Image (spheres, helix red, strand yellow):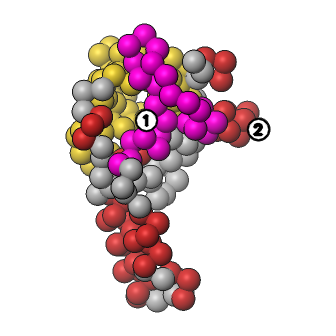
């Protein structure tokens, strides 16, 4: 139950008005996708409703969707922007309990439960110093965003962030 409440809090935070705190632009996940990107239009054109799971055309359509997700466009205007964003963390580089490299995703279970979100909804994060974390916890991440595609075992990322701080998420922290 605790995780569902946390997930709902993150969802509400992602649609709240934007602000700048401590020189960081508070963002929601939708802002990471370019305004003119409409993946629903391409998926609708595939007409999946008329296909059975075992149909080779369904398999081909799913491959097209996966390719579209892996190559989801990023927003060039976000290059170099200092952001503050809530999200969940998936460790990539771990030494004991300390993590220096991880993915930040918009919802609990993203990437671990296939399929992962679009590349423009996955941020590849690098911490300046190792931190101790649990991957099921939600965090506020602050750092400088850059456009950088990376393939990871958990999905393709469209952004990279150099992390300035990562703090446990609390709904009361919303500015």
Q: Position of residue 15 (x, y in %)?
A: 58, 38
Alpha carbons under labels 1 and 2: distance apart: 22 Å
| Residue at far right of view | 1
Q: Which residues make up the magenta segment?
A: 11-34
Front in this rendered view, residue 153 or 40:
40
Q: Secondary structure at mark 2?
A: loop
* Location of the N terminus (image quadrant): top right
User: Is residue 32 magenta-colored?
Assistant: yes
Along the polypeptide, which appears first: circle 1 or circle 2?
Answer: 2
Which residue is painted at 43% across and 80% down in the image? 46
Whether residue 86 is visible to the viewer of this picture, yes or no, is yes
Q: Residues within 10 Å of mark 1 (few under 14, many from 20)?
A: many
Q: Which secondary structure, mark 1?
A: strand
Quadrant of the frame with the C terminus: top right
Along the viewing direction, whichever of 175 and 132 lies nearer the viewer: 175
From the top left corner, tell me how far across and down residue 22 is, in percent: 43, 10
Quarter of the image for residue 122 reads: top left
Q: Residue drawn 43% across and 35% down?
A: 104
Q: Position of residue 43 (x, y in %)?
A: 44, 72
Which disc is residue 104 wearing? 1
The disc placed on residue 144 is none
Residue occupying the point 65% across, 23% down: 171
Based on the displayed image, in which of its 4 quarters is residue 129 positioned?
top left
Kindly identify which residue carries mark 2: 1
Q: Label 2 neighbourhood size at 10 Å, few (<14), some (14-19), many (20+)?
A: few
Residue 95 at least partly seen: no
Q: Residue at x 44, y 53 (%)?
A: 116
Q: Is residue 75 magenta?
A: no
User: Of all residues shown, which one is farthest toward the top?
Assistant: 22
Do tag 1 and tag 2 residues touch (Cβ < 8 Å)?
no
**Horizontal side of residue 76 vs 62, given as left or right:** left
């Amino acid at each position: 139950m605790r995780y569902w409440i946390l997930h709902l809090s993150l969802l509400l935070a992602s649609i709240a008005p934007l602000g700048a705190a401590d020189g960081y632009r508070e963002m929601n996940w939708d802002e990471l996708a370019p305004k003119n990107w409409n993946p629903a239009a391409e998926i609708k054109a595939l007409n999946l409703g008329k296909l059975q799971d075992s149909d080779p055309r369904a398999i081909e359509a799913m491959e097209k969707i996966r390719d579209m997700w892996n190559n989801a466009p990023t927003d060039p205007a976000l290059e170099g922007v200092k952001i503050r964003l809530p999200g969940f963390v998936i460790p990539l580089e771990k030494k004991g309990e300390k993590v220096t490299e991880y993915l930040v995703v918009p919802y609990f279970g993203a990437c671990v439960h296939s399929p992962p979100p679009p590349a423009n909804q996955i941020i590849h994060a690098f911490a300046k110093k190792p931190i101790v974390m649990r991957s099921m916890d939600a965090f506020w991440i602050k750092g400088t965003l850059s456009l950088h595609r990376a393939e990871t075992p958990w999905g393709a990322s469209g952004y990279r962030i150099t992390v300035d701080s990562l703090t446990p998420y609390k709904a009361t922290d919303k500015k």
